[in-house]
Amino acid sequence: MRALWIAILCALLASCAGTSEQSPAGVEDRKPGAEARGAEGGGPGSVDLTGKRGASVLTDPASPLSKRSIFYDFDKYDVKPEYRPLVEAHATYLRENPGTKMLIQGNTDERGSREYNIALGQRRSDGVKRMLLLLGAREDQVESVSLGEEKPRAQGSSEDAWTQNRRSDILYQGEY
């Protein structure tokens, strides 16, 4: 029996010790000012975080980081696929700027009770926070709160107004 185990172990070791060599993995340059790049060229690491265009990457209209709102369908709190690249870009920024803090404000339209809207707004902001954390942001960098229906972007009781009010807004430290 012991000889069988030794033979199996030797066979496993021999199969692991093949002659093909794997090329070493690339090393990412993490020095300030280094270009961030993703493996595919279009992933979240491909966002220009260096601000080489002269404007702050958080306010430059050409930067995805200047986009700060995530919109939802009625009575929903899941982040739609169209907003995932936006959340990924903000997660990359937080990962590469560990001293940066963010506030996510969950908002709702006016329909529903005050209590229901506060809870729905919190689920919306918590969902964005959870995505950011899964993408590498730290817990101490992100706070999520609900404003419910108290901070509408659009006035009125129409579908157009309600669509603008069902959102999560991203604010960075100094903006709240």
Image (cartoon, rainbow, N blue to C red):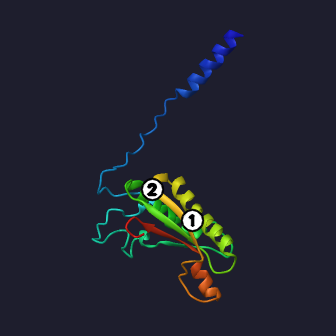
Q: Is residue 91 above or below residue 56?
A: above
Residues at circles 1 and 2 in contact by the CB criterion of under 8 Å: no
Please give the name of the residue rendered at 68% of the width and 80% of the height, measured from the top-left corner.
111
Q: Position of residue 134 (x, y in %)?
A: 54, 53
Quadrant that contains the N terminus = top right
Q: Position of residue 58 (x, y in %)?
A: 38, 69
Q: Position of residue 105 (x, y in %)?
A: 53, 69
Please give the name of the residue rendered at 47% of the width and 64% of the height, measured from the top-left corner.
103
Q: Residue furthest right?
A: 1
Rate crowding at label 2 as few (under 14), some (14 to 19) or many (20 or more) other CA atoms within 10 Å: many
Tell me the kind of residue under disc 2: Gln
| Distance in Å between CA atoms under marks 1 and 2 | 14 Å
| Left or right for 12, reference 56 | right
Rate crowding at label 1 as few (under 14), some (14 to 19) or many (20 or more) other CA atoms within 10 Å: many
Q: Is residue 3 in view from this perspective? A: yes
Q: Is residue 121 above or below residue 16?
A: below
| Left or right for 54, reference 27 | left
Quadrant that contains the C terminus = bottom left
Q: Which residue is mark 1?
A: 125
Q: Is residue 138 in view from this perspective? A: no
| Left or right for 25, reference 34 | right
Question: In the rendered structure, which disc, 1 or 2, sits on the residue that comes first in sequence?
Answer: 1
Q: Which residue is mark 2?
A: 141
Q: Is residue 162 above or below residue 32?
A: below
Tell me the kind of residue under disc 1: Ser
Q: Nearer the viewer, residue 113 or 27?
A: 113
Label 2 residue SS:
helix
Please give the name of the residue rendered at 42% of the width and 54% of the height, measured from the top-left corner.
95
